[in-house]
Image (tube, rainbow, N blue to C red):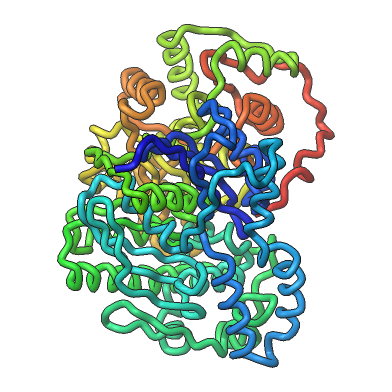
Amino acid sequence: MVGQLNILGISAYYHDSAAALIRDGRIEYAVQEERYSRKKHDSRFPAHAVQFCLDAAELHVTDIDHIVFYDKPLVKFERLLETYVAYAPRGFRSFVTAMPVWLKEKLYLKSLLKKELAALGGVNKEQLPPLRFAEHHQSHAASAFFPSPFQRAAVLCMDGVGEWATTSVWLGECETLTPHWEIDFPHSLGLLYSAFTYFTGFKVNSGEYKLMGLAPYGTPKYAQLIEDELIDIKEDGTFRLDMDYFNYATGLTMTNKRFADLFGGPPRRPESEITQREMDIAASIQKITEKAVLRLGRTIHREMDVKYLCLAGGVALNCVANGRLLREGPYEDIWIQPAAGDAGGAIGAALASWHQLGGPRTVNRNDSMRGSYLGPRFDGSESQRRLQSFGAKYADHDEPELLRRVAALLAQEKVIGWFQGPMEFGPRALGGRSILGDPRSPKMQSVMNLKIKYRESFRPFAPAVLAERVSDYFELDRSSPYMLLVAPVTRALRLSIRENQKQFSGFEKLQVPRSRIPAITHVDYSARVQTVHESTNPRFYALLKEFDRQTGCPMLVNTSFNVRGEPIVCTPEDAYRCFMRTEMDYLVVENLLLGKSDQPVWEKDDPWRQDFTLD
């Protein structure tokens, strides 16, 4: 039995840098660096994130007992070298590009980490606590199993690539996590999906969710072609890729000319028109991904004789596949780490270290992520002080009056920025840093996409619904607190489609309301559901209750508080800037309510579109 320990987990230098603080096995704080730096998917050393964790816990870096990095860079370097040797001389250009970065920084990551941490704490390197390294997929697996509500479960990790593994299977039992088997680079479901993300004109490691959202507009006409030429999926779900079509192992792009010839032309140029080809390609690769995930899930269940499954890694953010695995798979329940990508590796690395040191595990009935509300919060007086620096005008209300006014405004189809409590950890806004709207409004989806988020019109929005009412609206019989499950809207709420509308294709489908809650119903009658729980977010829960009281609808449209290319807002200043730069109608910051028309004039030539790179 270990004594009291403070363990700092860090992920950095690839994408989505983050820091997490585990105190005596409890997840206390976790935050992504991008929220402070305002650079989306920031990969630099997470200095701001580490400092937040230390300050929030009232610790100095020398008070930390162990610092754990989420992967092993020397093993990753070994994979890089072996890959270049295997594909020589094809990879020479990529090799020349990659090597200076490795030789200057990543190969000496231990020294670099110590240098950054010492500078942060104003101490010598010798004064730092021990620095440990977890394996990449071990960090993913630990982030999935240890916070889960299960005593015993299988764990499936799927991403682009860690050191070598791209898919790994583990067995979690109480405080232990045992690896069972893995699929190694270059055969990767995550990289396959990213290759199609690149080919359809979206940004790799950022636009995969766009590809998933685009899929229902197309038909999977290329699915058989993908299976015939690109990926061989065995009956047990294991797979191999034909690398003759891909460049990612040796080149500077994801796909090559042979890949393009297979799909009748070159990749779509970013920001150009999305055609039916891209929609059909999206539908096809989504179908293939779901097929592989379902087969893997069934095989793991058969091999390991478990009732439950935990998921992590970037592929675990494919909430459509997750929904099918829950509905059609053999498990009693599944649990997905809300920060399933590399950011969550910071939590996983720290938890893995805690349990390796003999620390006990407490299993909660729901989970141990505390709703993923693990970031900074700002009380009312601090929020007022920060907003006053802009000359902002606001009214200060007690909570009952605030909720009544906000619910009434939402019922009038106003769009509201909602900033309260601790910031969420992971890629989803869950009611801490959200933009809210009325799901009953037929115009809400287009208004929020084009005038608030400044993003593609086809993108769907998620419903945040009272947990106890979810089955009234969706074919879902359990909680989904992290917006990581897609479920069909109940048939009773669906609207019939006229005969002529059935012939619509592509984005024409957007013209047809699909249900009585059209703002959150995708064209295939699905929705990415968030259940809201009083125990983890009492104020957001209370707002939904009040909206239900006034309208008879226990849900709201919930999207992240940012514009395209911008990280989710972190501070009241970030929230106010985003509010003033968009066509949001009102802003709520803790107990403060701000109307757009009451604010000082905002400079129209504010170059905010240059502040953020389009994702």
Residue drawn 60% across the image and 39% down it: 49
Is 14 located above or below residue 85 in the figure? above
Q: Is residue 127 visible?
A: yes
Q: Which residue ends up furthest to the right in the rendered image?
A: 605
In screen coordinates, is 243 left or right of 512?
A: right
User: Where is residue 152 shown, x and y percent of the image?
Assistant: 20, 55
Left or right: 217 in relation to 447: left
Q: Which one is nearer the viewer's eye here, 434 or 444?
A: 434
| x and y, in percent, of residue 81 in the image | 62, 81
Q: Position of residue 143 (x, y in %)?
A: 39, 51
216 or 201, which lies in front?
201
Residue at the farthest front position: 126
Q: Choose between 141 and 544: the one closer to the eye.
A: 141
Is residue 34 something one can see in this rendering? Answer: no
Residue 229 image offset from top left, x and y in percent: 47, 89
Q: Is residue 115 left or right of residue 406?
A: right
